[in-house]
Amino acid sequence: MKLAHTMIRVRDLERSLDFYSNFLGLHEVRRKDLGDAILVFLTGEDGHHYIELTFNKDGRDYELGSQFGHLAFFTGNLDAVIEKVESVGWDYRGSRPETGSKYI
């Protein structure tokens, strides 16, 4: 298994993009508008790991500590991971039809 991305919620998408792009040197590789939110994926020169900036359009404020959303991992054998998760008694949410993701 390898790290896919980490997600951070942002209040100001343009200001955040300016910081991650111009200060840290990351570049945008993908953007997805979900209707109520915009996801922007950024990566460095090697392109191996991504930061996902999530901007919620509804204007709600975030509490300190709630900006971090999740860590995502790639796996070549999702069934084996799920079997291992179940064997230790962890709960997980079911598949999302459009992505095949599991949430553990």
Image (spheres, grey):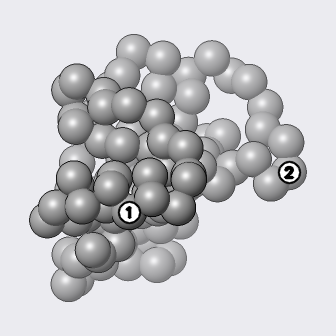
Q: Residue visible at 30% across and 28% down?
A: 96
Name which quarter of the figure residue 62 lies in.
top right
Instruction: Determine contact: label 1, label 2, CB under 8 Å.
Output: no
Which residue position holds label 2?
A: 64
Task: Name the residue rendered at 85%, 42% in the picture.
Answer: 63
Q: Position of residue 81 (x, y in %)?
A: 31, 61
In the rendered image of this protein, does residue 95 appear above or below residue 52? above
Image location of residue 37, percent across then percent down: 47, 26
- Please indicate, yes or no, whether residue 54 appears anywhere in the rendered image: yes
Q: Which residue appears at 46% of the width and 78% of the height?
A: 24
Furthest toward the front, the residue is: 87
The residue lying toward the viewer, choosing from 21 and 95, is: 95
- In depth, the one of 14 and 75 nearer the eye is 75
Residue 13 shows up from this direction: no
Q: CA distance from mark 1 to mark 2?
A: 33 Å
- Report which quarter residue 10 is drawn in: top right
Q: Position of residue 54 (x, y in %)?
A: 50, 41
Name the amino acid type tagged 1.
Answer: Lys
Name the residue at the bottom extreme: 46
Q: Is residue 103 above or below residue 88?
A: above
**Badge 1: residue crowd in 10 Å (few <14, some 14–19, many ≥20):** few
The residue positioned farthest toward the right in the image shown: 64
Judging by the rendered image, the residue that carries numbered circle 1 is 84
Question: Is 7 in front, or is 95?
Answer: 95
Which three-letter amino acid code belongs to the residue tagged 2?
A: Leu
Circle 1: element type: helix
Q: Percent from the top left, x then y, of residue 11?
A: 66, 40
Label 2 crowding class (10 Å Cα cut-off): few <14, some 14-19, many 20+?
Answer: few
The number of discs equals: 2
Residue under the point 34% across and 72% down: 3
User: Which badge, 1 or 2, is on the more N-terminal residue?
Assistant: 2
